[in-house]
Amino acid sequence: MITKPVADTTNDELIRLMVGRDLSQHLFPPRPSTTRSAKPALEVRALGRGGFFEDISLVVRPTEIVGIAGLVGAGRTSLLKAIFGAAPATRGTVSVRGREARIRTPRDAIDRGIAMIPEDRRAESLALHLDIIANTTAVRLPSRGGVVDRGQARALTTAAVREVGLQGRLERSVSDLSGGNQQKVALAKWLSIRPDILLCDEPTRGIDVGSKAEIYALLRRLADDGAAILFASSELPEVLGLADRILVMSRVD
């Protein structure tokens, strides 16, 4: 164990001591060197939900990571849930790949290639008492003749967890995993359907800095492969370090 006075310890040194390696230059992956223009994957116009947010318009293009910053209560979570159909908007429109989409439920969103990582992974994203395989295949459950194909489920899970960097037995209960590994399972769940649009609400809340760096790198790889990513975060350094563009939400009562 190493003990040092707080006044003599830098932030970069503290991170190195926590994770065992230097992340000062690699916490956030490099952005693309050139701006890549494309037709919007997601377009929101004058979206509103009474009491939560009003008149929100935004565009997210393929290969782009757009961050939403703002104080608690500004409506960031409510906006993402509205786009995903978990708490539908009462006015305005959502268009996916240039076509207006009527999204009233999460299933409507999933059918249009939209996925969401919610803020509270334990309550809204994962079934903690089930194993990694069951959680990873929850969106796309392989079956044969009406019976779950366990072999195919294992194959899908193996590929997905390899991509997110999760190691160990797939039969482990998700409740036994660290916060960072639970978030990796939450991401792996959506990789099986390769969403065109990924919504993330506080994607690294409550996880260690090493896992944060891995998730940042994964989000950048997904964007580089063509996904459009919209994420909300209360951590300004995270928004500044990860986003290609930044939107700010404020609530004026």
Image (cartoon, rainbow, N blue to C red):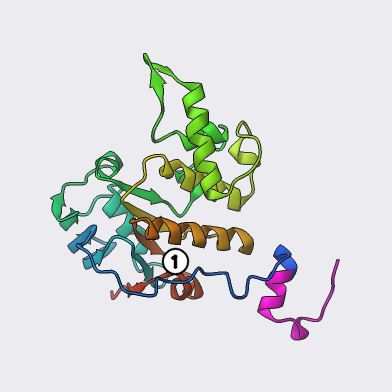
Give the side of residue 242 with respect to residue 181, left or right. Answer: left
Classed neighbour count for the residue bearing mark 1: other residues with Cα under 10 Å, few (<14), some (14–19), many (≥20): many
Give the side of residue 68 with respect to residue 2, left or right. Answer: left
Give the labeled residue for mark 1. 233
- Residue 67: image quadrant is bottom left
Residue 15 shows in the view: yes
Give the side of residue 169 with respect to residue 46, left or right. Answer: right
Residue at the bottom extreme of this rendering: 7
Front-most of residues 172 and 22 = 22
Estimate the x, y position of residue 56 in percent, counting from the top left. Answer: 22, 67
Location of residue 38 with respect to 181 vertically, above or below: below
Residue at the front extreme of this rendering: 33
What residue sits 43% from the left and 71% below the top? 31
Estimate the x, y position of residue 25 in percent, counting from the top left. Answer: 59, 75
Amino acid type shown at disc 1? Ser
Residue 49 shows in the view: no
Q: Which residues are magenta?
A: 1-16
Location of residue 78 with respect to 7 vertically, above or below: above
What residue sits 66% from the left and 39% below the top? 168
Estimate the x, y position of residue 163 in percent, counting from the top left. Answer: 51, 47
